[in-house]
Each structure stands twice: as structure tokens, then as C-alpha cells.
Amino acid sequence: MPTTTARTASSEHVLARMEQHDHEELLFCHDRATGLKAIIAIHDTTLGPALGGTRMWPYASEAEALHDVLRLSRGMTYKSSLAGLDLGGGKAVIIGDARTQKTEAMFRRFGQFVDSLNGRYITAEDVGMSTTEMVNILKETKNVAGLPEEMGGSGDPSPVTAYGVYCGMKAAAKQAYGSDDLSKRKVAIQGAGNVGRYLAGYLVKEGAQVFLTDIHDDKLAAIKRDHQAITLVKPEEIYDLDIDIYAPCALGATVNDDTLKRLKCSIVCGAANNQLADESVHGKEVMKKGILYAPDFLVNAGGIINCAWERKGYNHKAAMRQTEGIYDTALRIFKASADLDIPTYLAANQAAEHRISSIRDAGLRF
Ligand code: NAD
């Protein structure tokens, strides 16, 4: 157990923030000896233990870190619920510079805080973390998932995430064009990273016309070497292309007031988290423009599905099969959105909430 300060937030303001979206628990972690400053947020454990990565980031303020961890942990609840997993939603943030402030002691101390939650929170890798930190956390708690294969884990989730995005994209095409055939469809992928790279591979294989951009030319060159047919474009050009599908696989908030004036696609479907700059505003705007938005937390669930399999005894084939379920779930969400005349993100939120409340109301909670 941690020997230093570990306290649950008690100020009125923080509790009010928790009340807003029904967060169950916040653990503020501080350790003078290692310089650790972290917040672990457990949003909802109705369906199972709260699983979500730890992010290390030099937040400008505690308020910013709190905002991020509350938002991200809630997102994990919705993602796991919609994916049909027996997992709740949680997330952790460590305030600090991942390039200069990491030490073994800091992450072992953080591992002790995770352990103090007795399995209610399971951590994993997120922005700013690497295998080294996961190894150190693992020294203090077994409540870690998404470990590298050499450590008995499920390895890099990105190929599975990409496959889920591809399945979601096919479902979106079925809804928008009446056929899920992506051959000859023009797809613009933003981000040639871990997910973008594999997604490009699936699309090229099916015969889609792929446009790809990244801020790093070396990443583009490597993919172009494998897939000659891909057309490389400059980062800013991506929003002005004459395309069928825009696939954000880099940053959040790229569907916003500016880009919505420029985007000429009929589908938005990609891996990036929080693609809509303001869910309630831009979720409605895409709908008004006749663009079908495949909710990000629905189509990018392959990674968490892969992680969940690690807990049952990892089986790659089974993880891929379960990820394929994103196709049917997406069709169900698109239908609900059309029937109720509501934005797709809202239909997805409602489906996620409905599963949680039905389990809670039946007294079946974890
Ligand atoms: P990554 O860091 O490997 O790749 C992101 C790529 O985007 C990088 O190559 C980066 O150079 C590029 N990029 C950054 N800014 C850009 C810009 N303005 N224009 C064009 N390219 C830009 O990340 P990833 O693992 O491929 O994940 C991609 C997105 O999907 C992220 O938002 C991530 O949070 C989300 N996501 C990933 C997974 C997963 O399994 N990896 C799961 C769920 C969600």
C-alpha cells in the first residue's frame, strides 16, 4: 500500500463535477519522494472493473488534468458497454513531462496506488507511457492490461483497432450507399501511425483509392513503399479532397466549424478519439450536412476488445471475431439514429447507457 497521501477528492467543486456525469470515484495520488502527481478516475463499474490507460502529460493546471481524466474515463465506460464487454470505464493521468520526469520509483509508487483500488481499476498504456513504465507498475500490482506479448500480454492493439475501424467503415458504406463494398471508394486517412498504417492496408487490399497524410514524411514514405497505389497529400489538403470517406486517425476535434465548411465526404469514420470538437454541436452539424458519422468510441473499440481477451486468456482469432461485431453494432446504431432522427453519437450514447442501466436495474452489477 502507498505510504504517502492518497485521498479521495472531497471539495464541493470536484464532487459537483463527479455528479454531473455520475463518476463513482476519484483517487488523487501524491508522493513527495518520487514527485508523483496523478489522478485515477473510476467512472462506472456496473458492467465490470474499470479498465482504461494511464496518460502522462504536462498539463498546464490541475483543472486541465481533472477535466481530461473525467472525460476520458466516461468515454471508456461507453466504449466498453457498446462493445459488449464486461468492463467498466476508468482512466488515469499523471501530471508531468514524459520525456524528462519518468523514474522507476515514480511508476512503482503509481502501481501501489492502482493496487490500493483492489481491482476496481485496471490500468494500461496510453499517451506518454511505454513498456518500461508498464513493467514498473506491474511490480506493484497485477491490475495491468494490454501488456506486450513477451510479458504474456496481448501486444500492440493497433492492428485490431484498425480492423474494427475497417468493419465500422464497411457498415457505414452499407448504410450510406446501400453496399458495403469499399472498392473504388475514395478514402482519406489522416495519420500514418500505428492504426492508420494498418487501415490503409485493409483498404488498399479491397481496392479502395486511398489518400494519406501525416506530419512526418518518413512514416508516409514507409507506407508508400508497401502500398504503391496510395496517394500522399499534405496535412492541410486532407479537408479539401473530393472523397467519399474521411478517416481521422491522428488527432481529436478535427470535425469542427472550420473543417465542416470544407469536408466533401459522405462518411466520417476513423480511429481518433473525440473527433467531434463539440459533440452536441458538431454531431448535429454533420447530420445536417448529410454526412454519416460513425461514432469514434464505437468503431475504435478493437483495442479494448483485444485487451479484454488478455484477461480471459489471450486468443487473437477470438479478439478479431469479436471486433467484427462492430459491423452489426454500427448498423444497429445507424438505424436507431435514422428511426429516431437523432445524431449517431447520441444513438450510440443511448445504446451504451441502456445496456448499463438494464444490468444495474436487474441487480446484476459487478
Ligand atoms: P500514432 O501516434 O501511432 O499515430 C498518429 C499519427 O498521426 C502519427 O503518425 C502522427 O505523426 C500523425 N499526426 C499527428 N498530427 C497530425 C496532423 N495534424 N496531420 C496528419 N497527421 C498527424 O497513434 P495511433 O496508435 O495510430 O492512434 C491514432 C488515433 O487513434 C489516436 O487518436 C488514438 O488515440 C486513437 N486510438 C488508437 C487506438 C490504438 O489501438 N492504437 C485505439 C483507440 C483509439
Image: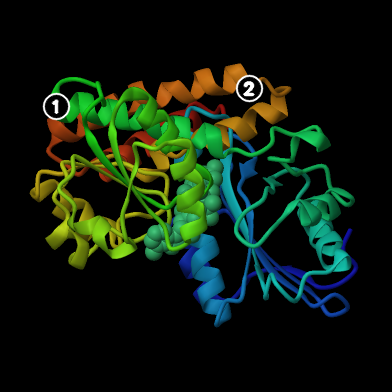
Residue 302 position in % (x across, y down): 51, 33
Which circle marks residue 316 in the picture? 2
Q: Residue at x 51, y 61 (%)?
A: 70
On screen, residue 199 above or below 25: above
Residue type at numbered disc 2: His
Q: Residue visible at 79% across and 62% down?
A: 110
Disc 2 is placed on an element classified as helix
Horizontal arrangement in the rendering, residue 83 relative to residue 95 (left or right): left
Q: For this rendering, which residue is in front, 215 or 157?
A: 215
Q: What mark, if any, has residue 73 been given in the picture?
A: none
Q: Is residue 360 above or below residue 109?
A: above
The residue closer to the viewer here, 133 or 70, is 133
- Whichever of labels 2 and 1 marks the residue nearer the N terminus, that label is 1
The residue singled out by tag 1 in the image is: 177
Q: Amino acid at mark 1?
A: Tyr
Q: Residues within 10 Å of mark 2 (few under 14, many from 20)?
A: some
Q: Residue 4 in the image: state x and y as whole percent.
A: 86, 72
